[in-house]
Image (cartoon, grey):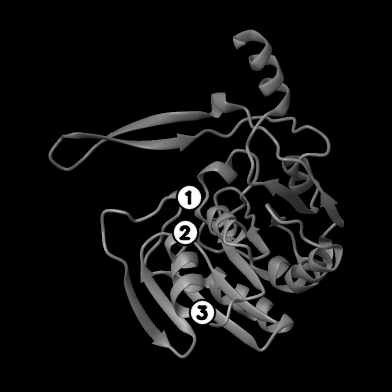
Amino acid sequence: MRILITNDDGIHAPGLAVLERIARELSDDVIVVAPETDQSGVSHSLSLNDPLRLREISPSHFAVKGTPTDCVIMGLRHILKDRKPDLVLSGVNRGQNIAEDVTYSGTIAAAMEGTILGVPSIALSQAFAYGNHEAIDWSCAEAHGATVVRKVLAAGMTPGILVNVNFPAVRPEKVEGIAVSVQGQRNQSLIEIEPRHDGRGNPYYWIAFRRGRQSPAEGSDLHAIADGKISVTPLRLDLTDLPSVTRLAEALE
């Protein structure tokens, strides 16, 4: 099995090294194509107005000056154009990608692009405790990653569907199981704009998130992570809401 791996945190991100070790538990044929720099939050963007720069940093390891989506296209349509991979793995992301995160995440977008191009694709992310951005414990993803991927592949992957896997911020032995979850929804009142001033007194702003009490819906990815479970969520590329199609068709005909 040939595996293409990528991420949105950049070619030198520790989570990418974790993912490569996971991939090598599954196959000896692993190719890394990842962004030159951190591309977190770029979603499914393409570089249409700038050229893509490709750099081979070591055998089977390539850096692309572009987005995660660019990396998957570069991998499938250029680097591996004559030897298509059997699987695309994206991650392991620094931080969870659940609920609305899936619409912002470059990690998820890379798996989407792999799916669009006809390759089974799985995104993997490691949650961390609030305020612990620097000292992330990757052991849960590393210990359970290969097993979860094997189980997902054994169950079969439907064309047009990618799988989003999130590991809780607990030690591997503390995992409470695997939960097949639906995409959750956060309390959006927690998002805000934080104003600041630079050294010259000019204003600038950060998008910020306040801590607050949440009661995630049972069965959601938010609930699974809060319970210390590995969340596995199948996501569709087709975003059409069929009930609305019927309703609008009746209203507009």
Q: Give the mark, 1 or 3, whose residue is nearer the N terminus.
A: 1
x then y, percent, for residue 194: 37, 32
| Front-most of residues 42 and 79 | 79
> Label 2: how many residues lie within 10 Å, few (<14), some (14-19) or many (20+)?
many
Residues at badges 1 and 2 in contact (C-beta under 8 Å)? yes
Identify the residue at horizontal 62%, vertical 30% (top origin). Answer: 212
Query: Secondary structure under badge 2?
Result: helix
Q: How many marks?
A: 3
Q: CA distance from mark 1 to mark 2?
A: 6 Å
Residue bearing mark 1: 44
Q: Is residue 12 visible?
A: no
Q: Quadrant of residue 114?
A: bottom right
From the viewer's side, name the closer residue of 36 and 77.
Answer: 77
Q: In the shown orientation, is residue 2 left or right of residue 61?
A: right
Give the residue at x 20% y 41%: 198
For residue 77, side relative to residue 186 (left or right): left
Identify the amino acid type marked 2: Thr
In screen coordinates, is 50 left or right of 23?
left
Mark in the foreground, 2 or 3: 3
Q: Quadrant of the N terminus?
A: bottom right
Query: Looking at the rendered structure, which numbered label has been put on residue 80?
Result: 3
Q: Amino acid at mark 1?
A: His
Q: Is residue 182 above or below residue 24?
A: above
Label 2 sits on residue: 69
How crowded is the residue under tag 3: few (<14 C-alpha within 10 Å), some, or many (20+)? Answer: some
Where residue 173 sits: x, y (%)?
83, 67
Give the mark, 2 or 3, whose residue is nearer the N terminus: 2
- 112 horizontally vs 168: left or right: left
